[in-house]
Amino acid sequence: MIAASAGNVVVWIVWVVAAFTCLGSAVAVVSFSNPFYSALALIGNLGSLAVLYLLLSAEFVAAAQVLVYAGAVVVMFLFVIAYVGPRRETPWSGGPGWQTIGAVAAAGALMVEIIVAIGMQASGSLSHETEVGTAFGTPAWIGRVFLVDHLLAFEITSVVLLIAAVGGVILGSHTKRATT
Amino acid sequence: MSGPDVAWYLALAAVLFGIGALGVLIRRNTLVVLLSLELMLNAGNLALIALSRHFHNGAGQIFALAVMAVAASEVCVGLGLVVALNRRNLSLDVDTLSELRG
């Protein structure tokens, strides 16, 4: 019993650290004026989210998060930011003042709306905790669920990725302007 | 090993989504808007995985992986647009990009 409560404390500490890292780096992504630093802060955000996924016993998704996001997406962002070069932008001002105030109000209203909607709709079913087995979230389990139960989603995902890759090549290729 | 309740994860996801939405609305650099979109997608992923763990249902994790693939596609197309804009010497300010014709 004591060991179990000690494990709980450790899980809570890890959760709090990961949650604050996540929120802090998210604020950093939004508030840095240099997009290079924003992309670097996004790496911290993705890493802390991977820790949270591990706490939720989603091991394969955590690994995919690190590989796909921090490994591929952020590197692509950094390449493009280096290619585009430094652009000057005043971070929090710019435009009329009411625009900033309206944006803050809209984002806050969206957040409150999400919390209220979840609390009203799902508070009854969120109270009881279900125990999961040790196989939950492992690559073998994910692979079986993916390729047996959700095969169509898997194939559609591959088609989406192919279309996006073709679109990226077309957008990035040297084409003459249609109307000169 | 039971840590925080699923409601904590959902609240964290909601706050993260709010920060991402604020970034999309308030920033004018196209690249930072794309980065903030990533934050919003990640908030959705966190909620999906928390509920997948809570209800012991694998569909949430599968959906999260599909969201990752869609996010990679979105970054691919978005960065292609940024490169195309940069090649035509257009501004990357989303307030000035009000026309589709370059």
Image (cartoon, coloured by chain):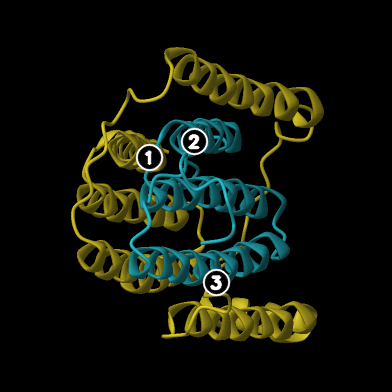
Q: Quadrant of residue A46?
A: bottom left
Q: Is residue A69 left or right of residue A144?
A: left
For the point 77% across and 32% down, which residue is it? Answer: A122
Q: Residue furthest front?
A: A180
Looking at marks 3 and 2 on the same chain, the residue that comes earlier in the sequence is marked by: 2
Q: Reply above or below: A111 against A87.
A: above
Q: Position of residue B19 (x, y in %)?
A: 45, 33
Tag 3–tag 1 contact (CB < 8 Å): no
Q: Residue at x 52, y 75 (%)?
A: A180
Q: Which chain is yellow?
A: A
Q: Which mark is residue A151?
A: none
Q: Nearer the viewer, residue B33 or A43?
A: B33
Label drawn at residue A15: 1
**Residue A19 position in % (x across, y down):** 37, 37
Question: How far apart are labels 3 and 1 at the CA level?
Answer: 30 Å
Q: Residues within 10 Å of mark 2 (few under 14, many from 20)?
A: some
Chain B's colour is cyan
| Residue A50 vertical placement versus B46 (above, below) | below
> Mark 1 to mark 2: distance in Å?
8 Å
Which image quadrant is residue B69 in? bottom right
Look at label 3 and name its amino acid.
Answer: Ser
User: Can you identify the residue that label 2 sits on?
Assistant: B4
